[in-house]
Image (cartoon, grey):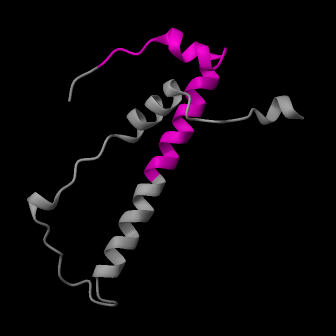
Amino acid sequence: MSLEPLSIKEMESQSADIYETVVVMSKRAKQVLGDRIVEEIIETSDEAEMGVYDELVETNPEDYEELEKPTTVSVNEFIEGDLDWKNEQEDS
């Protein structure tokens, strides 16, 4: 996993306020993480028997799927212009 520098100018092209940019990306990262947690709960609840939690389910290391971090997903979506948001304070 390597570090890649982010261009502030690319972010400013989407929004004039850098603080608004950070808030939008952080809220999207929370959404992505929440979606992954819900998806994991649904998958494990389908596999597990109801009421039997005495045994830990062993997972095979080959079955592990490495996903992109939620923060990285949200930053990439923001820079590519895939995120839509509105400022509720300006609307009122």
**Magenta residue span:** 4-33
Q: Is residue 28 above or below residue 53?
A: above
Residue 15 belongs to magenta span: yes
Q: Is residue 25 left or right of residue 55?
A: right
Measured from the top left, where is residue 84 in percent x and y? 64, 36
**Does residue 24 belong to the magenta stretch?**
yes
- Residue sitting at x 18%, y 76%: 56
Instruction: Work out whether 36 lies above or below 41.
Output: above
Q: Residue at x 30, y 18 (%)?
A: 4
Dominant secondary structure of the residues highlighted in magenta in the image: helix
Residue at 50% in and 11% down: 8
Location of residue 5 with respect to 41 vertically, above or below:
above
- Pinpoint residue 32: horizontal percent, then vertical percent: 46, 48
Q: Residue furthest top?
A: 9
Query: Residue 71: x, y in percent?
Result: 42, 35
Vertical placement of 37 versus 77: above or below? Answer: below
Q: Residue at x 52, y 29 (%)?
A: 78
Q: Nearer the viewer, residue 17 or 85?
A: 85
